[in-house]
Image (cartoon, grey):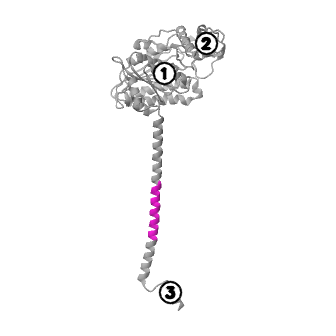
């Protein structure tokens, strides 16, 4: 009897009742499960939405921050660019000058502006040497109506904006990491500026409409360990002695590619030891002048065989004439929309003085103009990438550019010393006691 009761409780006699209750129980379980899953799904959607909103907000904040802190952009900026690029002479050109606050860049920009060409400068004002000197050059340019954009040649967005704002006819590319010895301390800066920066600029040029003609600064350093003198453009340049030289050689190969593939008109200029007023403080003649005036010893390097080092010192005004002539004789690029229509002009020229002078002779000239005897410390040249001599063959530039240097080292250093004493405030008679 007891067993029957248990069976009735466990297994009711009405089969349908069991089915219905079991079905209701299953539905309740399914509903609870579905409700739980739906809730989780909704929470997940909410979490995803909040995360996406946060990311979007952060992106907006970052973009806004970059926009607000950028040193370029806006209607006022564009008006300054267009005013600076305005051509003021018949058949004038509109030139973007990179490295405009640099030594050569400042002089070239002023020469172009003085004859009525449109000029817009670009410079990142890095601290390789005293940025205050670059700021002073910028002020000189501003006084002549040349606007200099503070930005990096690696900034593709900035370059695109510049070409969108002004249809430049020419680019004078002088921005670069200079100096042979500094490459030992900071090799990455040479790849960043001289290789990556050049490619970024050429990408902007090949995509521009119209494509500009490009003139850029290579270097006599590409001749490297070449012992044939004077150096000629047809000489081999496959043995660089420094990373700086290697990046400039790479630049010549890169520009050739862009000329061949995209129809960019390109002229490379191999500068030979440029000097003069507003020069670079890292150059020997500049640092010698500073140390001689301060009574500090100067280090004069000598070749390992005891020979004096010699350089083909080229005065800045002569270099400027060569740069301007290269711009004036540059043919139009032949590409459109990033595609070449026909073969474009490609040239390389030496710009030197053709009269190498030894470093001791340079020091002697400075001593005469400063009226102060130098304290010389003569040592053997270390293996830092410097070469024992440079000597330019300029026959090609003379024939095709009309290039003819006219300033010898004696005259050029006299002008430099006069500028140096004026710029750095030496009011006393040089050579007298303080």
Q: Earlier in the sequence, mark 1 or mark 3?
A: 3
Q: Earlier in the sequence, mark 2 or mark 1?
A: 1
Q: Which mark is residue 7?
A: 3
Query: Circle 1 sits on which residue?
Result: 139
- Secondary structure, mark 2, is loop
Marks 1/3: CA–CA distance? 106 Å
Q: Is residue 42 magenta?
A: yes
Marks 2/1: CA–CA distance? 39 Å
> Magenta residues, as a range?
29-47
Query: Circle 2 sits on which residue?
Result: 308
* Nearer to us in this view, 98 or 245: 98
Q: Earlier in the sequence, mark 3 or mark 2?
A: 3
Asked if the residue at tag 2 contacts the one at tag 3, i.e. Cβ–Cβ closer than 8 Å, the answer is no
Q: Is residue 33 magenta?
A: yes
User: Looking at the rendering, in which quadrant would you find the C terminus?
Assistant: top right
Image coords of residue 99 (percent x, y): 48, 24
């Amino acid at each position: 009897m007891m067993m029957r009761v248990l069976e009735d409780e466990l297994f009711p006699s009405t089969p349908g009742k069991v089915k219905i209750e079991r079905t209701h129980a299953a539905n309740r379980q399914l509903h609870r499960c579905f409700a739980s899953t739906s809730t989780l799904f909704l929470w997940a959607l909410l979490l995803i939405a909040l995360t996406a909103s946060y990311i979007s907000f952060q992106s907006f904040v970052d973009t806004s921050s970059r926009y607000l802190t950028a040193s370029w952009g806006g209607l006022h900026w564009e008006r300054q660019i267009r005013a600076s690029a305005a051509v003021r002479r018949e058949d004038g050109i509109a030139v973007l000058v990179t490295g405009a606050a640099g030594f050569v860049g400042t002089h070239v920009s002023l020469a172009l502006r003085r004859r009525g060409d449109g000029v817009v400068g670009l410079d990142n004002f890095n601290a390789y040497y005293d940025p205050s000197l670059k700021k002073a050059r910028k002020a000189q340019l501003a006084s002549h109506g040349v606007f200099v954009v503070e930005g990096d040649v690696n900034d593709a967005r900035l370059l695109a904006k510049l070409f969108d704002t002004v249809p430049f006819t020419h680019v004078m590319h002088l921005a670069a990491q200079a100096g042979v010895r500094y490459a030992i301390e900071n090799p990455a800066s040479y790849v960043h500026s001289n290789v990556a920066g050049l490619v970024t600029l050429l990408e902007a040029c090949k995509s521009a409409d119209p494509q500009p003609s490009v003139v850029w600064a290579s270097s006599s350093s590409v001749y490297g360990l070449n012992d044939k003198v004077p150096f000629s453009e047809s000489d081999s340049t496959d043995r660089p002695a420094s990373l700086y030289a290697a990046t400039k050689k790479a630049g010549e190969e890169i520009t050739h590619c862009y000329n061949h593939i995209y129809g960019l008109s390109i002229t490379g200029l191999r500068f030979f030891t440029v000097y003069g007023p507003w020069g670079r403080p890292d150059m020997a003649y500049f640092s010698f002048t500073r140390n001689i005036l301060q009574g500090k010893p100067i280090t004069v390097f000598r070749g390992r065989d005891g020979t004096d080092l010699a350089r083909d010192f080229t005065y800045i005004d002569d270099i400027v004439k060569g740069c301007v002539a290269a711009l004036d004789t540059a043919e139009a690029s032949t590409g459109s929309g990033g595609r070449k229509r026909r073969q474009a002009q490609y040239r390389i020229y030496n710009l030197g003085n053709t009269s190498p002078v030894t470093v001791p002779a340079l020091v002697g000239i400075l001593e005469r103009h400063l009226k102060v005897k130098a304290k010389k410390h003569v040592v053997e040249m270390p293996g830092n990438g410097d070469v024992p001599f440079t000597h330019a063959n300029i026959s090609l530039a003379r024939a095709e550019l009309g290039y003819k240097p006219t300033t010898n080292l004696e005259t050029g250093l006299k002008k430099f010393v006069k500028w140096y004493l004026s710029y750095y405030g030496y009011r006393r008679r040089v050579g007298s006691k303080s």
